[in-house]
Image (tube, grey):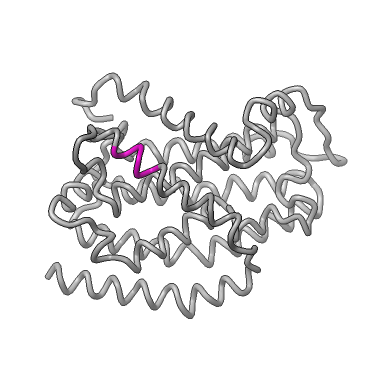
């Protein structure tokens, strides 16, 4: 954490993240408080000989990875962790979600969660390269891996204006990162709920909180990376961050109800044939402009 980080940031970051997570849970149906109560009092159900330690480690790690990924995103003008390699840190924490989801699926000792874990690994292999190239495009445009420098580089023109392909690829990868909407096959109803098939009670609550937090952080990262951070008239910087995050999050939530689920083999083909070539061309254009 930077020495000049104001103390209010220590409180504002978890409060803002928690508020967005509750709002996302409410939009997901059923209302957050009744769902919370049901999960807290729900009876845990498990298959024969599950690895409970790994199961809980996976669920907790998913939420932890989301929180740590969001720590480098500035809430206004200051981030909780102002790292020189903030873009790399964000990507690394997002990759940790792979391990969390795999542990959760594998440890249940049940076929459906295991299939869900395999689906997410396949999904991760498909989205991670275009996602990484989109982040590299942003870093090349800013000439830095520090998130604050990326925001500063957009003072004259937001990156979304001259990096539209990278922005669209990032949004697609954000859906895949949080296994949300059309990218929700790891939790597919055709495999009895997939990774979460054997989760119940507080274990399921923590996992769901981690999933919502990951979606919120993915939406929030689009603000400093592509939408100029807290830049905007009238409102303070933190106000614009909240407004822009809500707009991106709303678009991601809308996608769930507008697009069907995508099979992993088709998404992988689209990723290698369409997304990666497009984002590489975008990276080349940005590199030429910067040079």
Q: How many marks?
A: 0
Is 75 situated above or below 245? above
Quadrant location, the C terminus: bottom left
Horizontally, is 224 left or right of 217 in the view?
left
Which quarter of the figure has residue 115? Answer: bottom right
Is residue 100 part of the magenta span, yes or no? no
**Displayed quadrant of residue 131:** bottom left
Q: Residue furthest bottom?
A: 273
Q: Position of residue 220 (x, y in %)?
A: 39, 44
Residue 260 in the image: state x and y as whole percent.
64, 64
* Residue 51 vertical placement versus 123 (above, below): above
Residue closest to the far front: 234
Q: Quadrant of the N terminus?
A: top left
The location of residue 206, given as percent across then percent down, is 62, 32
Please give the name of the residue rendered at 62% of the width and 42% of the height, measured from the top-left corner.
28
Residue 243 is covered by the magenta coloring: yes
- Our reading of the magenta stretch's main secondary structure is helix
Q: Is residue 290 left or right of residue 82?
A: left
Residue 10 located left or right of residue 96: left
* Span highlighted in magenta in the image: 240-245
Residue 31, how many percent across, how many down?
Answer: 64, 32
- Determine the residue positioned at 40% across, 39% down: 70
């Amino acid at each position: 954490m930077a020495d000049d980080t104001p103390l209010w940031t220590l409180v504002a970051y978890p409060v803002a993240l928690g508020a967005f997570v509750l709002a996302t849970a409410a939009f997901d149906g059923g209302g957050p408080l009744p769902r919370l109560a049901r999960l807290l009092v729900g009876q845990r159900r498990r298959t024969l000989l599950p690895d409970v330690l790994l199961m809980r480690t996976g669920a907790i790690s998913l939420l932890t990875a989301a929180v740590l990924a969001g720590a480098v995103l500035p809430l206004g003008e200051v981030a909780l962790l102002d790292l020189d390699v903030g873009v790399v840190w964000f990507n690394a924490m997002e990759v940790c979600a792979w391990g969390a989801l795999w542990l959760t699926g594998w440890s249940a000792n049940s076929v459906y969660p295991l299939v869900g874990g395999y689906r997410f690994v396949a999904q991760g292999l498909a989205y991670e390269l275009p996602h990484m190239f989109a982040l590299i495009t942003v870093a090349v445009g800013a000439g830095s891996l520090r998130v604050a420098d990326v925001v500063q580089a957009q003072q004259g023109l937001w990156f979304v204006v001259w990096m539209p392909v990278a922005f669209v690829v990032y949004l697609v990868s954000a859906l895949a990162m949080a296994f949300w909407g059309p990218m929700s096959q790891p939790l597919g109803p055709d495999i009895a709920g997939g990774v979460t098939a054997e989760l119940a009670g507080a274990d399921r609550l923590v996992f769901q909180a981690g999933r919502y937090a990951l979606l919120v952080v993915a939406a929030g990262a689009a603000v400093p990376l592509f939408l100029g951070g807290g830049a905007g008239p009238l409102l303070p910087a933190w106000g614009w961050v909240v407004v822009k995050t809500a707009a991106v999050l709303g678009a991601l939530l809308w996608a769930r109800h507008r697009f069907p689920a995508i099979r992993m083999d088709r998404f992988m083909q689209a990723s290698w044939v369409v997304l990666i070539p497009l984002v590489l061309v975008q990276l080349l254009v940005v590199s030429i402009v910067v040079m």
